[in-house]
Amino acid sequence: MYSGRIAFQKPSSLGRLHSWPDRNGPNGRWNNSVRAVVPANNYLSQQQQQNENETTEQSQELAEQSNAPESIDPECLIKHPLQHTWTLWYLEVDRTKKWTDSMNEVTSFSTVEDFWSLFNHIRGPSEIKVGGDYMLFKSHIRPMWEDDANKHGGRWTISMNKRLSDKCWLDTVLCLIGETFEHSDQICGATVNVRQKIDKISIWTADYDNRAAVLDIGRTYKERLGLRENIYYQMHKDTMVKLSSSGTKSTYTV
């Protein structure tokens, strides 16, 4: 069972979600995919945004007039780049739509600060509708079996008590963006599936034939999450035939 053991340092300053240009639609309005995963009380009205922008401009003018530039901590002006750009997707629950039409691209991030700004504002897995999924993938990879980067790959999957899903999902994401795995080139992304009784989290890898890399990723993942039970790796091609991970044979076990 997942024990919830992992740590990661948040930066002292977190950005505001509405301030990210790629989060907004035309004219600064929020697109539906962002609205689906951000609690309503995290939105700022257009008037609030205008007031805050005016306040920011005034602060900048005062800063420019200041004769004490040494009072500014240089660390506050620096963003720390990640090795890859990552894209967050949200699969909404809508049986009237095709699966591909229900998949919403929320946003992308490429720095530590922007990652924490995003995860500080959005709902955790425990707060989204049953049947919904979060998917975090490298920006050039779409979260589907058919993508060229995924079709020869597979996934390590763990199941957990729903009360642990938020922590386990965050820890999994930190493993990905923090380049925890030695074979990081084999990492495609991760998903969390929110279901009625239990939630499932999976790490997707690129090549199931690369046995050494797949097993190393599985062992590292198991160790970082403090898992005692075995975890299992399934090839996407087998899951596609079964149309579900249930009943699909496991290729590797650690």
Image (cartoon, grey):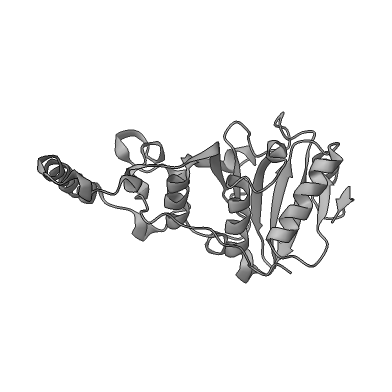
Question: Which residue reaches farthest top?
Answer: 148
Q: Residue at x 74, y 65 (%)?
A: 227
Would residue 102 be found to the left or right of residue 19 on screen?
A: right
Q: Nearer the viewer, residue 169 or 105?
A: 169
Query: Looking at the picture, how far across and down is residue 25, in whole percent?
Result: 37, 37
Quadrant for the N terminus in the image: bottom right
Whether residue 33 is visible, yes or no, is yes
Q: Nearer the viewer, residue 63 or 153?
A: 63
Query: Looking at the picture, how far across and down is residue 119, in whole percent?
Result: 48, 54
Would residue 101 be found to the left or right of residue 109 on screen?
A: right
Quadrant for the C terminus in the image: bottom right
Q: Residue at x 17, y 42 (%)?
A: 60
Q: Nearer the viewer, residue 185 or 18?
A: 185
Query: Looking at the picture, how far across and down is residue 211, in whole percent?
Result: 86, 41
Whether residue 133 is visible, yes or no, is no
Q: Is residue 151 above or below residue 2?
A: above
To which quarter of the image does residue 153 belong?
top right
Q: Residue at x 37, y 53 (%)?
A: 14
Q: Nearer the viewer, residue 83 or 129?
A: 83
Would residue 153 be found to the left or right of residue 224 on screen?
A: right
Q: Residue at x 36, y 37 (%)?
A: 21
Query: Looking at the picture, how far across and down is residue 250, in whole percent?
Result: 88, 51
Would residue 39 be found to the left or right of residue 28 on screen?
A: right
